Image: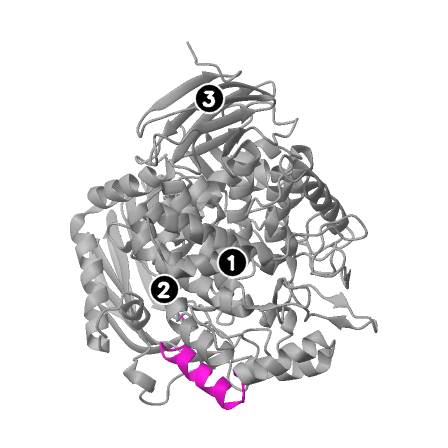
């Protein structure tokens, strides 16, 4: 156990070095992420920087200009709407293809640092000993990977962590009872431009492609295109990584390789400087010399701090964040768990739930930190592929939102902030798209985005409208702004950052809505991501009006805007428009088969077991349908889940678990969780996908899969597990609302609730035994309603005040 562990830490163990990327252990500080493979002679660190994306800052504007030249605009939109109303699907689709721009850009791998260790000479027996690897552990509470290696009687310990305070990846190597040798190599899958190797360490500079195409777009002559000269706007797509080393022993360099012999210790720090980071922070552009110097300076400052300070500050930083909340299912168990033997067989789902809850929080804290760079993407900040699945971008019809579902509830509210930085960029670009394409105020974003704030529909003129033509990306993301306020009651955030984004999105939606024949307001064209329906002629179609998801998202946005204006004391003319529009929005309907309807009309789904459940956004996360207040709609939602069937991939499982939790069905939620945490298998005789896709599962490092790897499932599991034990939708806090019968013992602390509340509780034999409720923000005059089963109580708490209750919600003695 390293000296930054505590006895209560959760640690994952792998007995061998990683044979592939999906066995490596992730570390990250929001900006730099590394996959730690471990090993002796060739220990790989695959390194990412969250700001290394293909593309250029002016890419979205140039794409919009090209789309406008192709004829897209308000006049053509009127023709499309007429075609949709007339049921002329082919004409509507043909006209809409001109609205599709290129694709959002690619999140790219950066560099590989490879370390070799070898015995420096014979041991006391006179024999030269090969290295023996004794395993890796990842501490989910302090973010340190620890390895132990033996050379005969010599023991080498290696610690690896990504420090937020230092802005660097750090590696410490120590040997006892003798010395060892070490080599370091630095390479990149990107185009290398310059390299320095001297006694102080290594520096590598690379070119970043100015354009990329997703893996699912095969007909591209140059999938990753590098600049052949000056780029538009003078942007220099360049990134530098610097490695600095402090060690004893004899250092030598040659052929770009750094080595030391006779070593007993080494401290290695790795830092980066990129053109993408300068764009993101709105800093002045740097030239290549400045990038190299900047990366080296950060690495040198970290090195100068020394091992003890680096580890202490990293531990204080990460622990203070991760210690905010905890969930334990089953008896108290801490320590080290073998991933292969204890977790991946899926036999002890209570232990697995405890680990997966903390793993999701660890991954979010490691990939999304304020001031470091863009928010967590489809793979967090970990990617080794030059053409990753779905570009490892921001997919806005469920996946990016799911990434941040656990942020507020599990005490990681500050990790939410990078998402709002991305929304600022989307809004800037999306204002021009809204005006030029739709003749609308405010801002719009569609299905995909990237670090540059892409807001156009993607698809290159042949993307299926079922996913490409969806104008509600910004509307759903705006819910996250309100959630951050609702949990924190931070009126300064709401006034300075939230209201401009909320009101801008509301202005777009007001202009996007059009009056239907019955006097209600419609969205036209409308799709339900990513499902299709059958037309009267039996053809699969995507375009219609007023999908249930559209109406739910707009209703939530309008309601949140009115609440925000009241909280801020604003008298904005926009509120009068919202108040007039709200009663004219279509409400959820029940299909003839008894399930929650997906479109404004009762249309037949092409795929009744589709992985997307877009109409269920009304249940979770929006909380518009609830078993208490809307029992008929809640029953229809349950019927839809039964119709959709079990899971198929990580994120779909996570959503279904959260939905079952909101509907009070903990036992089915547990069954879904048990499916989701089995090892990934491509054996269809073992797993039968419900919707024709590949069956997901967990990888050897517990990453969730689509497949392939997609991190939203990890984040979604954490959020869904929290929803099983505490819910705070509306003005009511529900305790153990969907506890599975088999999870008879457990505890939680620090879970956040809307209204500025924090809760903790314990249960034994399936029965609540104690509760704490504390107000950490908000209005002391607002009553706090607490419910457990059929018992309800109301509290009034000042900020900082805590109430302790027993299992019957009475004041504890």
Q: Residues within 10 Å of mark 1 (few under 14, many from 20)?
A: few
- On residue 155, which mark appears? none
Split into 4 quadrants, where in the image is the C terminus?
top left
Percent of width and height locating residue 199: 19, 64
Instruction: Give the Cα distance between marks 1 and 2.
Output: 28 Å
Percent of width and height locating residue 701: 52, 48
| Lower position in the chain sequence, tag 3 or tag 1 | 1
Please say if 145 is above or below 219. Answer: above
What's the residue at 65%, 34% (across, down)? 666
Looking at the picture, tell me which residue is in the foreground, 162 or 438: 438
Instruction: Give the Cα distance between marks 3 and 1.
Output: 43 Å
| Lower position in the chain sequence, tag 1 or tag 2 | 2
Pointers 1 and 2 in contact (C-beta within 8 Å): no
- On residue 771, which mark appears? 3
Q: Is residue 48 visible?
A: no
What residue is disc 2 on? 424
What's the residue at 69%, 46% (across, down)? 637
What residue is disc 1 on? 580
Q: Residue furthest right?
A: 537
């Amino acid at each position: 156990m390293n000296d930054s562990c505590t006895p209560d830490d959760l640690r994952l163990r792998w007995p061998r070095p990683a044979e592939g990327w999906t066995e490596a252990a992730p570390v990250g500080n929001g900006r730099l992420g590394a996959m730690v493979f471990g090993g002796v002679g060739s220990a790989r660190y695959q390194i990412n920087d969250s700001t290394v994306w293909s593309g250029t800052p002016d890419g979205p504007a140039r794409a919009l200009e090209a789309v406008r030249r192709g004829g897209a605009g308000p006049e053509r939109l009127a023709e499309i709407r007429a075609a949709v109303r007339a049921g002329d699907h082919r004409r509507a689709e043909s006209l809409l293809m001109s609205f599709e721009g290129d694709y959002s850009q690619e999140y790219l791998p950066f560099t590989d640092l490879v370390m070799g260790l070898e015995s420096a000479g014979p041991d006391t027996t006179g024999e030269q000993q090969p290295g023996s690897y004794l395993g890796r552990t990842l501490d989910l509470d302090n973010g340190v990977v620890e390895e132990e290696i033996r050379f005969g009687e010599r023991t080498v310990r290696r610690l690896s962590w990504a420090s937020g305070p230092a802005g660097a990846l750090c590696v410490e190597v120590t040997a006892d009872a003798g010395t060892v040798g070490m080599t370091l190599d630095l390479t990149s899958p990107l185009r290398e431009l310059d390299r320095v190797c001297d006694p102080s360490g290594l520096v590598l500079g690379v070119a970043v492609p100015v354009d990329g195409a997703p893996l699912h777009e095969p007909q591209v002559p140059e999938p990753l295109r590098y600049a052949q000269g000056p780029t538009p706007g003078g942007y220099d797509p360049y990134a530098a990584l610097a490695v600095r080393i402090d060690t004893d022993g004899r250092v030598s360099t040659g052929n770009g390789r750094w080595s030391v012999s006779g070593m007993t210790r080494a401290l290695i720090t790795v830092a980066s400087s990129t053109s993408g980071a300068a764009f993101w922070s709105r800093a002045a552009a740097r030239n290549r010399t400045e990038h190299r110097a900047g990366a080296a300076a950060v690495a040198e400052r970290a090195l100068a701090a020394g091992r003890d300070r680096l580890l202490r500050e990293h531990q204080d930083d990460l622990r203070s964040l991760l210690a905010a909340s905890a969930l334990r299912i089953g008896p108290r168990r801490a320590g080290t768990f073998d991933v292969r033997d204890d977790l991946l067989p899926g036999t002890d789902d209570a232990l697995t739930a405890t680990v997966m809850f903390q793993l999701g929080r660890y991954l979010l804290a490691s990939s999304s930190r304020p001031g470091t760079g863009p928010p967590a993407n489809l793979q967090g900040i970990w990617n080794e592929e030059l053409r990753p699945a779905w570009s490892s971008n921001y997919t806005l019809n469920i996946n990016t939102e799911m990434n941040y579902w656990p942020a507020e509830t599990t005490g990681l509210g500050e990790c939410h902030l990078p998402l709002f930085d991305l929304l600022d960029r989307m809004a800037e670009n999306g204002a021009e798209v809204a005006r030029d394409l739709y003749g609308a105020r405010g801002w719009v974003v569609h299905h995909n985005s990237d670090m540059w704030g892409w807001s156009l529909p993607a698809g290159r003129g042949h993307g299926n409208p079922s996913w490409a033509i969806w104008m509600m990306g910004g509307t759903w993301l705006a819910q996250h702004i309100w959630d951050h306020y609702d949990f924190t009651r931070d009126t300064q955030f709401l006034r300075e950052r939230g209201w401009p984004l909320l009101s801008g999105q509301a202005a777009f939606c007001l202009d996007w809505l059009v009056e239907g024949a019955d006097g209600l307001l419609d969205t036209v064209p409308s799709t339900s991501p990513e499902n299709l329906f059958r037309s009267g002629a039996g053809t699969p179609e995507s375009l219609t009006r007023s999908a249930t998801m559209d109406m739910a998202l707009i209703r939530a946005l309008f309601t949140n805007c009115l609440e925000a204006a009241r909280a801020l004391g604003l008298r904005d003319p926009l509120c009068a428009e919202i108040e007039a529009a709200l009663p004219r929005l279509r409400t959820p309907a029940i299909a003839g088969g008894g399930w929650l309807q997906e479109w404004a009309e009762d249309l037949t789904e092409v795929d009744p077991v589709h992985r997307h459940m877009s109409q269920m956004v009304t249940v979770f996360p929006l909380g518009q349908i609830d078993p208490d207040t809307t029992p008929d709609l809640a029953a229809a939602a349950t019927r839809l889940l039964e119709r959709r069937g079990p899971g198929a991939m990580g994120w779909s499982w996570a959503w279904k678990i959260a939905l079952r939790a909101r509907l009070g069905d903990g036992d089915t939620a547990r069954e879904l969780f048990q499916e989701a945490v089995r090892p990934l298998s491509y054996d269809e005789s073992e797993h039968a996908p419900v919707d024709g896709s590949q069956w997901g599962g967990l990888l050897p490092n517990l990453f969730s899969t689509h497949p392939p790897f997609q991190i939203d499932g990890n984040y979604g599991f954490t959020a869904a597990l929290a929803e099983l034990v505490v819910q705070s939708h509306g003005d009511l806090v529900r305790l153990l609302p969907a506890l599975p019968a088999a999870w008879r013992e457990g505890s939680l602390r620090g879970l956040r609730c809307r209204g500025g509340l924090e809760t903790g509780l314990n249960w034994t034999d399936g029965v609540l035994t104690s509760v704490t409720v504390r107000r950490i923000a908000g209005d002391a005059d607002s009553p706090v309603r607490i419910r457990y089963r059929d018992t309800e109580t109301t509290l009034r708490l000042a900020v900082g005040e805590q109430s302790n209750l027993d299992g019957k919600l009475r004041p504890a003695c």
